[in-house]
Image (tube, rainbow, N blue to C red):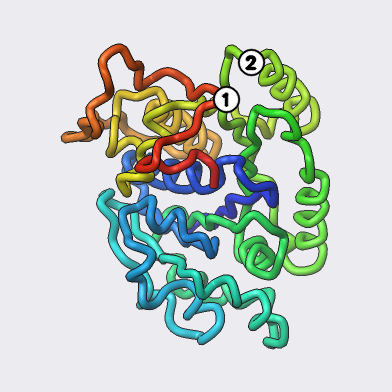
Amino acid sequence: MAKVIAVANQKGGVGKTTTSINLAASLAHYGQKVLLIDLDPQANATSGLGVDKRKVDAGIYDVLVDGKSIAQMIRPTSVEWLELVASTIDLTGAEIELVNMQGREQILKNHIEKISNEYQYILLDCPPSLGLITLNALCASNTVLIPIQCEYYAMEGLSQLVETIFRVKQSFNPALEIEGVLLTMYDSRIKLANDVITEVRKVFKDKVYQTMIPRNVRLAESPGFGKPVLKYDFSSKGAQSYLQFAREFLGRNGQIFEEKPPVEGTVASPVPQAGSDPDAPLDSESEPSAQEAPVSA
């Protein structure tokens, strides 16, 4: 039976979707069969795995609101062992439509239970809110993975998230636990980042992963090409950081994995300009170009 993990933080821009995509792809790289369910109306996890969200005619909205089979919504991705349930803009209205449904908090759980035996891990990319969709994710999950950016206001709203997890545990899902805390957007050049790390480790202690995800050009570019970073530029610091995180994640879950050779054909495009460093961290003041997707969820 799959372990179900909600990737959640109601604060936007912390790397939830980036983490959902790249952890899922990295686990698949190590031979785990993974399902990623995109629960965000922005559908960035959907497009980040190469699916044109404008052309998705049915997805998780149809499961939650119309009661359609989740098995019928599962689609393959370019990553072996990784499958996807896509999101659409229709999901924006789901919060309102779910309000009057009986057992509204358990709808997603009931659907996931029907396919759980098909996977080792099911990751739920949650929206940046603590509404009914996130509540459904928490009720359906065994654990919660919390990405936290190494920036100012990093701890903002976290107490509310932890309180929500506690209330869900009390009222709906007694087995729910925090899987761990992942520090994202780390830039060693910024003193504040190290202060944030110290504070997060003080609060969450051994729940904080040793692996930290850096700000990285390749990591920012890859969603714009519909690929996880390990399929875009395997040798980049972004790809190697998520692979390292996956190894730490699997180790904490008591799983043995085999090292795999680099993914073939991961020549990043477009070709970087002369003198540029694709492994350099993104400057805090820089913005991705029009064809690049942001690192944030």
Disc number lying in front (2 or 1): 1
Of residue 71 and residue 269, the one placed in the foreground of this image is 269
Is residue 218 toward the left or the right of residue 60 in the image? left
Decide: few, some or many residues near mark 1? Use Cα within 10 Å; few <14, some 14-19, many ≥20.
few
Q: Which mark is residue 284?
A: 1
Q: CA distance from mark 2 to mark 1?
A: 9 Å
On the question of residue 1 being in view, the answer is no
Of helix, strand and loop, which one carries label 1? loop
Q: Position of residue 80 (x, y in %)?
A: 26, 50
Residue 194, compared with residue 102, is above or below; it is above
Question: As shown in the figure, which amino acid type bears the numbered disc 1?
Answer: Ser
Residue 290, compared with residue 134, is above or below; it is above
Q: Which mark is residue 190?
A: 2
Q: Name the residue: 56% across, 53% down.
A: 5
Quadrant of residue 110 within the rendered picture: bottom right
Of residue 88 and residue 238, the one placed in the foreground of this image is 88
Q: Name the residue: 48% across, 41% down.
A: 294
On the question of residue 27 being in view, the answer is yes
Q: Position of residue 4 (x, y in %)?
A: 54, 57
Residue 111, compared with residue 86, is above or below; it is below
Q: Name the residue: 49% across, 24% down.
A: 282
Q: Position of residue 191 (x, y in %)?
A: 68, 13
Question: As shown in the figure, which amino acid type bears the numbered disc 2?
Answer: Ile
Q: Which mark is residue 118?
A: none
Of helix, strand and loop, which one carries label 2? loop
Residue reaching furthest to the left: 265
Is the residue under label 1 in contact with that under label 2 (CB below 8 Å)? yes
Mark 2 or mark 1, earlier in chain:
2
Of residue 286 and residue 104, the one placed in the foreground of this image is 286
Is residue 174 toward the left or the right of residue 36 in the image? right
